[in-house]
Amino acid sequence: MKKLVAYITSGYPEKSFTVDLALALGDSGVDTIELGVPFSDPVADGPLIEKASHAALRHGIKFEDVLNISKEVAPNLDTLLMGYFNSFYQHDMSKLIPHLKDIGLNGLIIPDLPHEEAVTYSGLFDSNNMSNISFVAPTDPEKRIQEIVKDAKKFVYMVAYTGITGSGSSEDLQPSLQSIKKYTQTPVYVGFGVNQKTAKDKIKGADGVIVGSAFIDILLKDNLTYKKKISECSKLAKIIKNEINS
């Protein structure tokens, strides 16, 4: 069974909504939820996620709020935090990682932390049975791919193209996917530009997909009630889960 990871922005449009949405997505076929930590300069994210992140910050979302959301979601669904390194570093990684594990989180996704710097925290993650998700891009040469994935945990995040999330660009991922699978048995999930139209193509050669902007696009629709937003996101999750497994 191919896996579906869903990214949602914590605290947008509000904290209790994030919990309700995450649990509904879990009931709709999502295997892992990626709780986004709102950040002022989300360099790897496209305009939709950036808009939601900025709105959450304007609404007063704090890191502690993200942790409180996590406490309600993580016991019910495999949960990761996705955020930029400064959001975590300022809380002292040596104290934060054990705390996140106690909450029930299973790992972090940090797109602006290069592999060379990430390895300095490997012992900390390993000792707490947490995963620091590894990224591979289509531009990475084979030698670098081998280095990145040799100790990858949980899954390898295969960036579907060079750029930001949600732009819809595409590249031939097969050479990179084949290179990754030469050096690790860790599952490979494809992210960036995955939606109900592209999911079937993106899943080729991969073990799962990561979907973010397609969900956030629904959340940003002001004409939808909270209940309708959850319903539409749940419907989308079911469609994509079916697409990647049919």
Image (cartoon, rainbow, N blue to C red):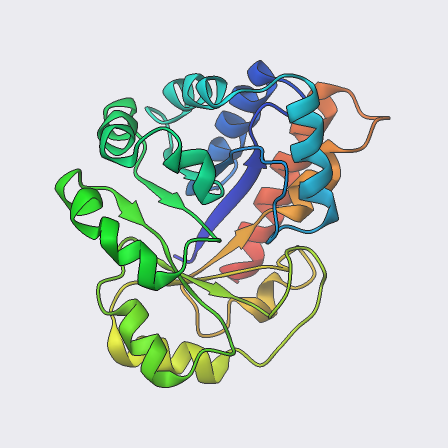
Q: Residue 205 location, x and y as percent?
A: 44, 74
**Residue that sits furthest to the left in the current view:** 127
Q: Is residue 50 left or right of residue 122?
A: right
Q: Residue 40 location, x and y as percent?
A: 63, 36
Specify whether residue 33 is in view. Answer: no
Quadrant assignment, res 224: top right
Q: Residue 100 location, x and y as percent?
A: 30, 28
Q: Residue 82 location, x and y as percent?
A: 47, 41
Query: What residue appears at the point 31 percent right and 55 percent down from the top-left corner?
Result: 118
**Residue that sits furthest to the right in the current view:** 223
Query: What residue appears at the point 25 percent right and 71 percent down from the top-left corner?
Result: 184
Q: Quarter of the image containing the N terminus? A: bottom left
Quadrant assignment, res 144: bottom left
Specify whether residue 91 is in view. Answer: yes
Q: Is residue 246 left or right of residue 153?
A: right
Which of 11/243 is in front? 11
Total count of labels: 0
Query: What residue appears at the point 59 percent right and 52 percent down from the top-left corner?
Result: 240
